[in-house]
Image (spheres, rainbow, N blue to C red):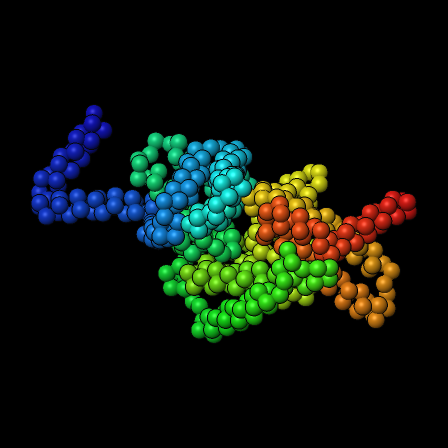
Amino acid sequence: MLKYHMHTSKQRLVSNKVKTSSPSQVGHHRMSRSTKVMKRKAAGCPFSFRYLFLLAGGGALAVAAMGPYAVLVFTPAVCAVALLCSLDPQQVHRWTFCFQMSWQTLCHLGLHYTEYYLHEPPSVRFCITLSSLMLLTQRVTSLSLDICEGKVEAASGGIRSRSSLSEHVCKALPYFSYLLFFPALLGGSLCSFQRFQACVQGSSALYPRYSFWALSWRGLQILGLECINVAVSRMVDAGAGLTDCQQFECIYVVWTTAGLFKFTYYSHWILDDSLLHAAGFGSELGQSPGEEGYIPDADIWTLERTHRISVFARKWNQSTARWLRRLVFQHSRAWPLLQTFAFSAWWHGLHPGQVFGFLCWAVMVEADYVIHSFANEFIRSWPMRLFYRTLTWAHTQLIIAYIMLAVEVRSLSSLWLLCNSYNSVFPVVYCILLLLLVKRKHKCK
């Protein structure tokens, strides 16, 4: 009874307070509750404006550059986000990889149909779309691997829970923005999702710190490379082509033509890297403790002075090489090197020249390991080492020129001309040395 009287007296006091409170105080309480609800909703989707800005910029750039073909990029992006948000972390990589590579292969088959069956030049917008689609495949598979390995928290649990539509969109928005953000839509090094998220949520995403001297230096590099391109293109135009060259002249033709391709790639990579830095995605802000640092695609100094094909393979288009190593090489049990280069040919489009060039590159890398390990054991004096390094540098540059031309010309007729020229001597020499040294190694064992 005593407890009952105390309880009723408390209820009366509370009711009296409510009755005596003024309307302004009641309105103030309601306003505070509504602001708390709004803060909770805003806290559920932080930095949404930045994600939307990057996504809208990517969509506008895609429509402007690709025209109606932009649908071929938007469709797999939407499907990839749907798979990422609905599947378990253990299954997400397998399904997203299969879907993305199937979609990209169908688009490449359309290019094959236009070039080899209709014998028509493909649309420039369609080629831009295929290039953007290949970069999208990198980001999709990188994100799915991060989720599968536990580096990124999966959104599948939140999507399956009973939440509002706005909460579902907020959880999927960072994925959409990462797959289509405009600084990396048409080029640039592969940016991981952790780095992307950290840069968006950091201050550098809105106020990127890019010094005037760094910008000037990159501008001078691009200008110098373009001047070299003009000079080399004049040399190529003035000389004979691959169809008209004879004997040793074909070596010069292949070397100068491959040089034109290389310096064009260098110029584009530096330009793409400058855009990523200017947008705030090339800094070390987004680097997690267990993640490799930001690596630009172009390491011109190493590429032009190395005497090893294996080093050239690791440094050429570095972010793609690192992506291939993580996606294929580290998960292959048998013949990982061959599987990696075979997948690279698939990812590039499976043109005849690409299949031949990448498989030849795989054999050359294997020969490079065997030949240089043998040479390091038997060449001791520094004059012989200097001579060996000079000889292998020239041989490496000529083999790389041979492979690059095979990949770039792509057609069977041009590939046949290349294989029948004197340039085929250089990879054949490495193949013979590989067979002899492997046979010697087995005899010694």
Left or right: 172, with 16 as reference point: right
For the point 49% across and 56% down, the residue is 188
Residue with the most extreme front position = 244
Dividing the picture into quarters, in which one does residue 359 lie? top right
Q: Quadrant of the N terminus?
A: top left
Q: Position of residue 355 (x, y in %)?
A: 63, 44
Between 197 and 267, the one nearer to me in the picture: 267
For the point 20% across and 32% down, the residue is 6
Whether residue 109 is situated above or below residue 417 in the rendered picture: above
Q: Position of residue 140 (x, y in %)?
A: 49, 43
Left or right: 292, with 312 as reference point: left
Numbered disc total: 0
Residue with the most extreme right position = 444
Q: Position of residue 265 (x, y in %)?
A: 55, 60
Left or right: 234, with 38 as reference point: right
Can residue 303 be spotted in the picture?
Answer: no
Can residue 381 be spotted in the picture?
Answer: yes
For the point 84% across and 50% down, the residue is 437
Between 418 and 271, the one nearer to me in the picture: 418
Q: Quadrant of the C terminus?
A: top right
For the point 77% across and 64% down, the residue is 391
Q: Position of residue 157 (x, y in %)?
A: 43, 34
Between 227 and 326, the one nearer to me in the picture: 227
Between 308 and 52, the one nearer to me in the picture: 308
